[in-house]
Amino acid sequence: MIKHIVLWTFKEQAQDKIDDAAKMLISLNGKVPQLLSIEVGRSIFSNGTNYQLGIVTTFNSVEDLEAYRIHPEHMKVVKFLENIVDKRANIDFETDVS
């Protein structure tokens, strides 16, 4: 299994777009065949140092993750996020735990 985890902070003028971003991300479930699972959540703390939104996704293989990255539905979300995100961090790793 491959885990793909992404965290974002948003520009000050885009704070009202975080829920829209979360809805778009969760809507990928069922639209991208290679995506086995997706969890989306807002930070429960808003102390200024935490990332504000995060996802945890699961794929069977690196190839499936690559297919997700270029999938047209995923690219719509990427396009939406590109102008409102301040910072982004991600990690991809292999695990035997699903």
Image: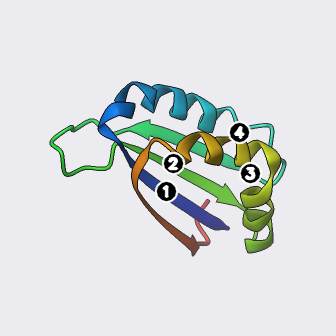
Q: Splitting the image into 4 quarters, where does residue 39 fall?
A: top right
Say whether residue 93 is left or right of residue 49. Answer: right
Give how far across and how far down residue 13 sits, in percent. Answer: 34, 32
Q: Are marks 1 and 2 in contact (CB under 8 Å)?
A: yes
Label 1 to label 4: alpha-carbon separation: 14 Å
Quick one: label 1, few (<14), some, or many (20+) residues within 10 Å? some
Residue visible at 77% across and 42% down?
Answer: 73
Pointer 4 with pointer 2, Cβ within 8 A: no
Q: Amino acid at mark 2?
A: Ile
Residues at marks 3 and 4, CA–CA distance in whole angstroms: 8 Å
Which element type, helix, strand or loop, lies under badge 1?
strand
Q: Which mark is residue 6?
A: 1
Residue 33 visible in this rendered orientation of the protein: yes
Q: Image point 60% across, 53% down: which residue?
A: 57
What residue would you read off at disc 4? 28
Q: Secondary structure at mark 4?
A: loop
For marks 4 and 2 on the same chain, the one whose residue lies earlier in the sequence: 4
Q: CA distance from mark 4 to mark 2?
A: 11 Å
Nearer the N terminus, badge 3 or badge 4? Answer: 4
Q: Amino acid at mark 3?
A: Leu
* Residue ID for mark 3: 35
